[in-house]
Image: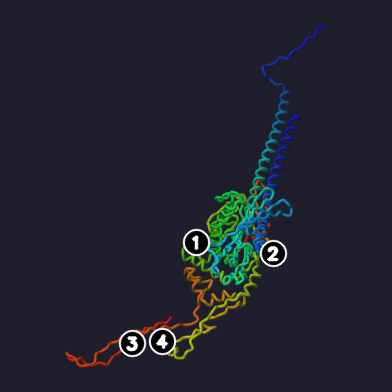
Amino acid sequence: MTVTSRQLPRSGGGFTVIELVIGGMILSIIAAIAFRGMQFAGRSVRMQESIEVGARLRNASFQLSRDLALATEILLPNQAAIDFSPLLIYKNQVNEVVAVFLSPDGLARYNYNLDQTQTWLPQATQFQCRLGADGLIEYQVTVAAEKRTFTLRNFLSTYQSLP
Amino acid sequence: MAIILVLISLTFLAILLGALATYSSGDLFSLQRLVAGKNLLYLVRMGLSTAEARLLTKRWYAPASEGMFELTSPDGQGTIRVYVDDFVRIKPKTVNGTDYKLLDHIKVSVIATWRGDRMYGFGKFVISPEPIYDARGSTIGANPQNSIGADGNVKYTTTLRKLINIHILLPDEVAHIPGFVAIDQFASRKAMAQSVIPQQLRYAENYGRNLRLSQAIRRGFPSPASTTFTVAQVKDLLRRKDPAGVPTTNAAATPDAVNRLKNAFLMEVFSRFFMTTDWDISPEEKARKLEKIHVVIGTVPVKTTDPETRQAIGLAFPGHPIDVREGIDYWTTFTPENGRTAGAKYLAQRGYSPTAVPTEKPSLMAADLSEIQTANSYLIGWKGKMRFVYIGEEDPPPRPRPARWSITVRAGLSRS
């Protein structure tokens, strides 16, 4: 019994249709996965940035609350009110007049006696404060980052002021 | 393929968990900082308050010149160490030939720790009049007039004792104090005390500098029309509220402006002065205390009633003597009335007004306020010129005889 085989002629370096389809499918899957991976990585970076902004917000609040804890007097707001004021004025530990407000450059702290300005939080989009009937000074700072906004509220007793 | 998908999923999960962990740890760290700062502040204040309370009783560490005590916070996580150091007046007080040391003040230094974080505090316990510095450790002042009785014992008197110049210091601030090594060393505590002096001076200077500005801001500040300000806008708002019209920076202030601010400060202090040992006092309580403060002028000279003296003055100074009348030209007592303090009424009666603060030196204003005109005094100075003429014959012939003698009187008159 003779068995013969018929070999197909192969040209140098070609792919069959099936090979191409399978290869294309694999590449598509890898590309899709890579694309999703890049999307995830991008989202992760944005989340990290958001976290960073949140941390800066907390740091700015920490600086402000320390300033207020050592303040000798809150000058503005000067009476308890429901409405918020966009301007906070107080005398710091050495009785210098200091104003905190939202400037085009972010949350600003301006020392009137020294004529010096510090920008605490460039990403800030809102600042407001009010004095409660219970003597608490309340302030809110808002920052915006990547379609997200973070607002930090803090309450401080003005009776903590040093004599 | 499945392996690749699993690996990618795991990577994504790791990124998510990592981000969450970072976020949580950042949040936790911030929260810990806030809680630590708050707790340390309370602990330092507790240390200062406890030291003041103990010193009001006595110097428990006498006859030593320094003492220390420790406290633990109720939760057991915070500790407070308080150091007190006596400072004796350099010049002793001599009574009946014996020198007695006087206690000038006591410096109080505090270190508070909470979960590894630290914070420092400083205060100066002042006593007036000064106590005799002896082994009994009393912080009650000795009577300045009669410090030691005939029996050799100290004669005590009413004493003002208070912890002042309080400062809270962070570790990084303390680390920059020249000569500070550790708070348990006297030299380090002294260095810490010296380091707060410039800050204390700034505190006092700025208090006077910003007094009127602070009052103006409290009285009424225009409601901000915007929620965003430029620095220039805020500067302008504050400058418009600065009644002295002083340039923004202290360094640029003119002498007149500075004098005006200091005089305004003196006037404010004089009109609202009272003594208290309370740290925190509400405005209402302060107003109630001020209602009990009267200004009483001391000795008023008796006016001249001798008719001959009055006649002589009247001859020398036409229209005089002018009597100053109590209740019209001067007052011996000022009492609070309708919310106006006694001090404020005295200032107004002397022509001083918050809207027209003088620019003279504060010492001159203080001197002016320290004396009032309760009488006019008259000084009459006599100056005589005599010419003697010889009477008798002589050669050459005598000149026409004038009066036997004459006296020219020139009266120099003055009133003071």
Which residue is farthest top? A1
Residues marked 2 and 3, same chain: no
- Label 3, residues with CA under 10 Å away: few <14, some 14-19, many ≥20: few
Residue that numbered label 3 is attached to: B409
The disc at residue B317 is: 4
Q: Amino acid at mark 1?
A: Pro
Of A146 and A108, nearer the camera is A108
Does any portion of residue A83 appear in the rendered image? no
Residue that numbered label 2 is attached to: A133
Which residue is farthest right? A1
Q: Amino acid at mark 3?
A: Val
- Of all chains, the one bearing label 2 is A
Query: In the picture, which quadrant includes the C terminus of chain B?
Result: bottom left
Of B129 and B238, nearer the camera is B129
How far is disc 2 from disc 1 in space, using C-alphas? 35 Å
How far is disc 4 from disc 3 in space, using C-alphas? 17 Å
The disc at residue B247 is: 1
Q: Secondary structure at mark 1?
A: loop
Q: Secondary structure at mark 3?
A: strand
